[in-house]
Image: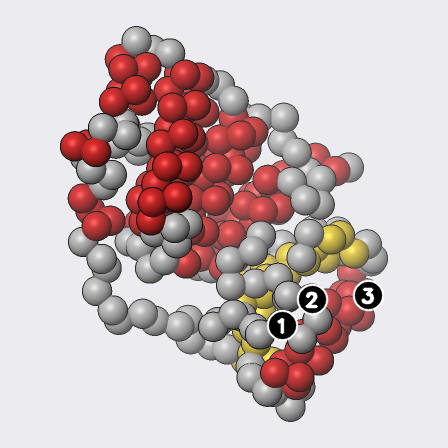
Amino acid sequence: MTQPLPTPPTEEGTMPPGPSPLPTDIHETLIVLPGGGVHAQGLLHDGSPDQLEVLIERVRGPLRAAAAQHNRPIRLSIGHPNGHVERQQISADGTIHADQDLPTDTSAVDPVWNQGIPEETGLLATVRAAQRAGQWRAAQQAARRATQHLTTQHGRDHPYVAMGTELQAYFAVMARDCAVAASLYIEAAVASHRLGGPEEQSRRCLVNAVTAWLHSDRDTSPGGAGFAAAHALIRITPYDHATLAALLQRLTTGRA
């Protein structure tokens, strides 16, 4: 299928409450904000730059406890104002080690990622009709219904669902609903990354997410799309220093 795409939380992270089993790969992210303060797990912790280590440990402390409780390491990636991402590993005994190398997945990418949502299913017929008519909001709604059907049929952890979410995001942009588009692109990026999709697809979704956020009302609330995009950049594209630094600066300016 040819999808009309422009040329842009919890994934493995967010600790579950209580003694529930940990996901296969716990990976938490933390943002150090320009001018002081940190953001993690949807919460903003205010403070001055000289309080940075105290603020980081406020987040890291419960992670140490979880690592010890479950007797397994937890990864923590810390994004800094200059865009640099510091990677740490919290061992089961609570010690902190530098996690220098990104985990590599040598498994082959499922061919379904390149095939797209099958047109012969008929799920996209209404989407395409609305697209041809330039009815972008109707196309977005039809794409949402198609994605819901795909979720019911295949489960949420399927490439088709990630593709459907990205398609919704595209039509949201075309309908000039950039705030919704930003959230959808982030969701698609995280899903593609979690499911082992092509790296380029996750990167594209993240770039589109940031662009959509910049063209929206720029929600800088702790639980908003701006911070969600920053955490996704830290997790998925930790070497994209310039994009992360620029986004953190925008988030700080927007909250001033």
Tell me the residue that label 2 is attached to: 17
Q: Residues within 10 Å of mark 1 (few under 14, many from 20)?
A: few
Q: Which of marks 2 and 3 is in front?
A: 2
Tell me the residue that label 1 is attached to: 20
Tell me the residue that label 3 is attached to: 51
Q: Residues within 10 Å of mark 3 (few under 14, many from 20)?
A: few
Q: Are marks 2 and 1 in contact (CB under 8 Å)?
A: yes
Residue 191 drawn at (x, y percent): 42, 51
The dot on residue 114 is none
Q: Which of marks 1 and 3 is in front?
A: 1
User: Which SS class for mark 1?
Assistant: loop
Q: Residue at x 37, y 20 (%)?
A: 139
| 220 to 62, vertically: above or below | above
Which quarter of the rendering shows the N terminus? top left
Q: What residue type is labelled 3?
A: Gln
Q: Which comes sooner in the sequence, label 1 or label 3?
A: 1
Residue 82 drawn at (x, y percent): 58, 55
Farthest bottom residue in view: 93
- Tell which of 50 and 113 is nearer to you: 113
Residue 35 in view, yes or no: yes
Q: Distance between the residues labelled 2 and 1?
A: 7 Å
Residue 7 drawn at (x, y percent): 30, 33
Q: What residue type is labelled 1?
A: Ser
